[in-house]
Image (tube, rainbow, N blue to C red):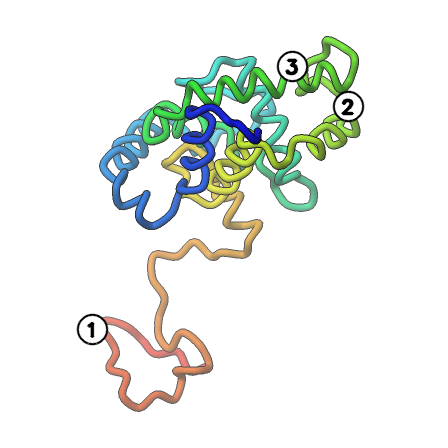
Amino acid sequence: MDQASPSRRQFLAAVGNLASASWITLNWPQIAVAAEQADQGGHGGHAAAAPPPAGLKTLTAAEAAEIDAIANLIVPGGTTPGAREARAVNFIDTALGSFWAAQLPSFREGLAEFATGFAAHSGAATAFSAAPEAAQTAFLHTVDETPFFLAVRRLTVLGMIALPKYGGNHEYAGWKMLGVENRHFWSPPFGYYDRDYAGFVPYPGTTIQTA
């Protein structure tokens, strides 16, 4: 990693810029198109969540299974839905096929290195997604600073909180986990700090709630 190739350095820089305000502004047209395509493709619908990734457009089934397994350990499910239930892998699939497509070759290269490293670490030919969770977790601790893992982690988090039309956050699972209420608008005052603000003028049609 000390003498990283130009493509690897570019990939790491892209991971760092992913979802920054300037990056979003620059890539907004592509992001908007990707959201429309994901929405038309049925991602973020109301079908029951299932472990096998479905509706993929960019990743192969085998690739998606590996990414899904990694994401499921980054944000595990339990009493609240995790990355698998939120279908974060579908968001990653959408991203790699649209606004983050330039990084797809490096992402696949990183995934291949990840698979090779896991085989060497486990001493078996078992895929990461088919290994016991303890073995998966132990291996992730050895690669959690690699550009590939950092990319999967950031994309997973984005897939948890982005609107469902982008492919992830299925049935707002990520928002529910964070306690975000899915409302179109809020009625003022918005908190104790502005309840008694004399200068506030309500918008037409709004009702001030003082309770």
Q: In the displayed structure, would residue 203 be above or below residue 84? A: below
- Which residue is disc 3 drawn over? 116
Can residue 170 be seen at all in this image of the molecule?
A: no
Q: Earlier in the sequence, mark 1 or mark 2?
A: 2
Residue that label 2 marks: 132
CA neighbours of label 2 inside 10 A, class few (<14), some (14 to 19), many (20+): few
Residue 145 can be seen, yes or no: yes
* Kind of residue at disc 1: Pro
Residue positioned 41% across, 18% down in the render: 58
SS at badge 3:
helix
Please name the amino acid that badge 3 sits on: Thr
**Residue sitting at 25 percent across and 78 percent down?**
202
Q: Residue at x 58, y 19 (%)?
A: 65
The spot of residue 66 in percent (x, y) is 60, 21
How far across and down, in percent of the image, does residue 210 sit?
42, 82
Q: Nearer the viewer, mark 3 or mark 1?
A: 3
Q: Earlier in the sequence, mark 3 or mark 1?
A: 3
Instruction: Between residue 167 and residue 184, name the one nearer to us.
Output: 167
Distance from label 3 to label 1 (Cα)? 61 Å
Residue type beneath disc 2: Pro
Q: CA distance from mark 2 to mark 3?
A: 17 Å
Residue that mark 1 sits on: 204
Q: Is residue 61 above or below residue 144?
A: above
Q: Residues within 10 Å of mark 1 (few under 14, many from 20)?
A: few
Mark 3, Cα crowd under 10 Å, few <14 / some 14-19 / many 20+, is some
Above or below, 53 relative to 24:
above
Q: Which element is circle 1 on?
A: loop
Q: Residue at coordinates 36% horizontally, 66% vertically from top-left?
A: 186
* Residue that sits furthest to the left in the current view: 204
